[in-house]
Image (spheres, grey):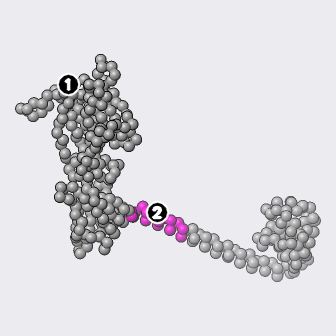
Amino acid sequence: MNKQQFGTFIAGNRKAAGLTQKDMAAQLHVTDKAVSKWERGLSYPDVTLLEPLAEALGLGVEELMACRKAEQEKEREPVRNLLEIFRESLKTEKRKYAWKTALALLLMLAVTWGTIYYCGIYVHEQREDTIFLKETEGGENYLYVEEQGHLLRLKCREGVDFDSIKQMNERGDSLCYRLDCRWNRRTYEGTVNTCEATGRSFFGGMMDVTFEVERDYLFWYDEVFYTSENYYPDPYGEPRGQAYLCDYHFWIGEWDNELLEWKDQETILLVEDCMNAVVEDIDQDGHNEVVVRTRWPEKPYAIYDWGDDFNIKEINRFWPETVSPELQEKLLCVWERYP
């Protein structure tokens, strides 16, 4: 069977069936240009189109392939058998392809799930931290560091000089180390590849410090007492763990030396979660103001002042963009003054 003979046969039967090239193309879901190429002998239709093409022309597939209408059933039988073999072979290949596709998709899903699981369970990071505990067990050295209410147990690799690691300096401040470690979120165990001193220390005992009570005239009062209290590590401060926040408490009252307690104590101002505060007459109006160093880099300073109308005893808060270098110096924290 040649292309020209096949094309002529298709064209003749199409016309006999009263179909245009466009009509037949629509039935077969191809373009009319493809039908034209078949009929001009330029190409064969795809194998999967033989059955729908034969049906559109009112022929059997064997008649289409033989390019003639069979007169007797026995003439059709060899071709029918051949086509049946071809169909079974095509189904087998499709099943193999489907299985291969399914296996490939399952493999991709397994790899993706494994990657997500691994990334969710195992952490590989470089962190700066203090060493909570050093321990040797079974001939292996371990370092313990804190992780959100847990202790990470990190086994030291060869790159870690375990003996040279000191937890505190002479003043009792915790020393800071840079660790390259990998650990498991479920077991809180892992390994540490390197542990290098940063040269910095974390001030110990800040949360237990009680600062002396100071006094000064403030706002419309002749004598106001104030102190900082309730220190706690700033969870977002940098360097990590070395910044603290506190409350500044301003009050009036009378200290009873016998009972060792305050009488008629009244809080006039409480500034919470700040880094530092000073009492200063910054506008030279004869009345002291409170200048606060906040925890926000966008608004680093706040000023608490008596309102413009001195007949109304009201404290107002202002947000200056900056303060004088002298005030900036006074507002430095202890860990910044003595790094």
Eyeballing the image, is 243 above or below 306?
below
What amino acid is labelled 2 in the image? Ile
Q: Secondary structure at mark 2?
A: helix
Quarter residue 170 falls in: bottom left
Q: CA distance from mark 2 to mark 1?
A: 65 Å
- Neighbor class of circle 2 (other Cα within 10 Å; few <14, some 14-19, many 20+) is few
Q: Does residue 265 appear left or right of residue 23 in this picture? A: left
What amino acid is labelled 1 in the image? Asp
Residue 222: assigned label: 1
Check disc 2 and report the residue beneath it. 116
Q: Which quadrant of the rendered structure holds the N terminus?
A: bottom right
Eyeballing the image, is 228 above or below 7?
above
Q: Nearer the viewer, residue 166 or 125?
A: 166
Quarter residue 79 falls in: bottom right
Q: Earlier in the sequence, mark 2 or mark 1?
A: 2
| Residue, far left | 258
**How many callouts does the rendering have?**
2
- Neighbor class of circle 1 (other Cα within 10 Å; few <14, some 14-19, many 20+) is few
Q: Nearer the viewer, mark 2 or mark 1?
A: 1
Residue at point 28%, 59% (across, down)? 199
Q: Which residues are magenta?
A: 107-124
Residue at point 75%, 78% (across, down)? 86
Residue 269 position in % (x across, y down):
26, 31
